[in-house]
Amino acid sequence: MGSVGPVDKGVVSVVDGVTVNFDPIELPGQRIVHGNTFPLVLKMSKPEGEGELSLDEAARALRDLSERGITTELLNKHGAVILRGQPDASPRAMSVLVHAAEEGRGHFPYDQLGLAGSRTVHEKEVFSASEAPPNLWIYQHNEYSRYTKFPSNIHFFCHAAPAKGGESPFAHSAEMYDRVAAELPGFLHDLTEKGLISPDVYRPPGKEAKNFIFTWAGPLAFGRDIQPGDDMATMKRKAEIQAARLTPHFWWRDNDELEVHQHVPAVRRHPATGKPVFFNSLAGRYGTAYDRGATDPPYVGDDGMAFPPATYRDGSTIPKEYLHRTWEISQEIAVLIKTQPGDLALVDNYQVSHGRAPWFEGERKILVSMWDTDKPEEKILDL
Ligand SMILES: [Fe+2]
């Protein structure tokens, strides 16, 4: 873990004679977690008199930081780094920037599997974030943390921001762990000892729900090999092959619905900081179910969608009051960032969860890009 460091004084990149400064700036609501600013916000600019920063200059500078190990150092220390100051808010700009940042440190694109949501591909490795209706909260979760496979990093890019609302909330999973440990020690003990079963129910193609539109046949769910014209039996066979890559625990329900159970730990340890992290989606899943009136059996929401809750791995029920308080804590510690077009938020998915605040006017377009590492020293650890 780094020096006091480049961080507090800012970071400088010089590539082919072009200097780019990364200077810390303050945003409302930033927190200090374990002594470090969360999230770190850096303003990118060229020195006085050297003109405006271009997308390509920003990308070269970012690649330089990554090749020098600084991107990883900053993410290990701060969990999330928001970069402001490059002028291009297009999906292509995000693609260029994230490729520079991640390829520069030897990471590769994460291959999504089992997506329980809808996402549109905008550019190479650039997807729309959730396409759920704007009036709905999306609560804190580490991306794909209910799953046996998940990305090391998820980055967010602001393409368009509404004047009011639609903030990007981030919460630090080490702070979340600390808070749950302090307030709900019995719950944390049970979670640590028992682990979780995360259930998901996927509707069949043509029977999508109202708010969260997805089916098992989606290309980012289990339908990557499904061809137009495949009959139901063929589609199911192809989906089974993909589901088996995540878990052996899946089965078909009535009406061609697919139920998938993934057995996962609820808490883990960050490979660089050594700190325990609350790495799961309990808060996010409970909050969504709560808003839909689906936190009691039969766990069906006012939108007709099934919200089966996570259980302990022995199949026993997690007391609802624990889930409710966990959800509240996740909202209490979240930092609501008002991103501007062109902002790139680099996020360590292992130690930072994310969500989405609702908005009621204007357009909010946040794009995401997911990356992974195969370096053993960078993989998340069991507690
Ligand atoms: Fe997400």
Image (spheres, grey):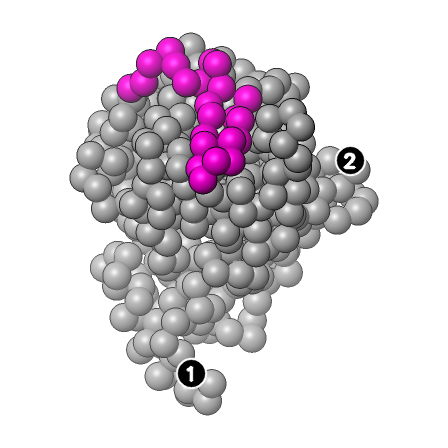
User: Looking at the picture, how far across and down is residue 114, in whole percent?
Assistant: 39, 59
Q: Quadrant of residue 13?
A: top left
Q: Mark 2: which secondary structure?
A: loop
Above-or-below relation of 128 to 22: below
Task: Please tell me which residue lies in front, 121 or 229.
Answer: 121
Q: How many marks?
A: 2
- The quarter of the image holding the N terminus is top left
Q: What is the magenta range? A: 1-23
Q: Mark 1: which secondary structure?
A: loop
Mark 2 touching mark 1, by CB under 8 A? no
Residue type, mark 2 in image = Lys
Above-or-below relation of 210 to 207: above
Task: Please tell me which residue lies in front, 199 or 88.
Answer: 88
Which residue is pictured at 45% across the width and 40% down the height? 16
- The quarter of the image holding the C terminus is top left
Q: Quadrant of residue 249?
A: bottom left
Q: Residues within 10 Å of mark 2 (few under 14, many from 20)?
A: some
User: Looking at the picture, how far across and down is residue 304, in whole percent?
Assistant: 60, 58
As drawn, the label of residue 85 is none
Whether the magenta-drawn stretch holds residue 8 is answered as: yes
Residue type, mark 1 in image = Gln
As drawn, the label of residue 164 is 2
Q: Is residue 57 visible?
A: yes
Query: Which numbered disc flags the more N-terminal residue, 2 or 1?
Result: 2
Kindly identify which residue carries mark 1.
227
User: Looking at the picture, how far across and down is residue 342, in whole percent?
Assistant: 63, 42
